[in-house]
Amino acid sequence: MNASRLQDVLDAHLNEGLGAHTWECSCGVTDQDERDMTHGEHQAAVWRAACTIHSVALRDALSVGSVVVYEDERAVFKSLPRPGVQSPAWIQPGSRYESTADEVPLPALLLWSPDWSE
Ligand SMILES: [Zn+2]
């Protein structure tokens, strides 16, 4: 998977307005569309949406070491492939043997991908 790159997302959402509260994003959204948001909050919302995984194909293509949150409560990371088992496990940090799952329910929020460090 080509995980979304923060710089690409931010490049598509530049503030062409006057400031944080009087803003006009290069994507066309303005402070009049999102009255409760600053431009920075708009950028954060766009980034969150870009990191939300809805498809099985994208989830399964995530790199080993990727960290996702699902059901708004559990952060898990993708393990190395396991011998004799087709899929890698999703492991909750600190609970290696208690909280493993073969699949993460969708949608899931990608918190970090090792691809981002490249
Ligand atoms: Zn925008």
Image: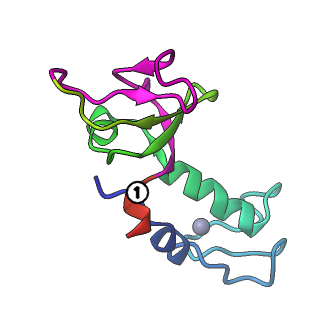
Could you say which is closer to the camera, residue 59 or residue 46?
A: 59
Q: Which residue lies furthest to the top in this view?
A: 98
Compared across the picture, whether 6 is left or right of 30 comes to: left
Write down the residue under mark 1: 114
Whole-percent x, y for residue 44 in the image:
65, 59
Could you say which is closer to the camera, residue 26 or residue 65?
A: 65
- Residue at (50% x, 39% y) in the render: 68
Which quarter of the picture shows residue 41?
Answer: bottom right
63 over 42 or under it: above or below: above
Could you say which is closer to the camera, residue 67 or residue 33?
A: 67
84 over 72 or under it: above or below: above
Q: What element carries label 1?
A: helix
Whole-percent x, y for residue 64 in the image:
33, 45
Whole-percent x, y for residue 118 in the image:
37, 70
- Residue at (58% x, 51% y) in the render: 48
Magenta residue check for 43: no
Whole-percent x, y for residue 3 in the image:
37, 56
Residue type, numbered disc 1: Pro
Could you say which is closer to the camera, residue 43 or residue 96?
A: 96
- Residue at (57% x, 72% y) in the render: 13
Main SS type for the magenta part? Answer: loop
Q: Give, as a single range, the part of the protein colored magenta.
A: 84-112
70 over 21 or under it: above or below: above
Which quarter of the picture shows residue 62?
Answer: top left
Compared across the picture, whether 101 is left or right of 81 comes to: right
Report the image quarter containing ligand 1: bottom right
- Residue at (75% x, 75% y) in the render: 23
How does the figure colour the protein chain or chains?
A: rainbow
Magenta residue check for 87: yes
Q: Crowding near pointer 1: few (<14 within 10 Å), some, many (20+)? A: few
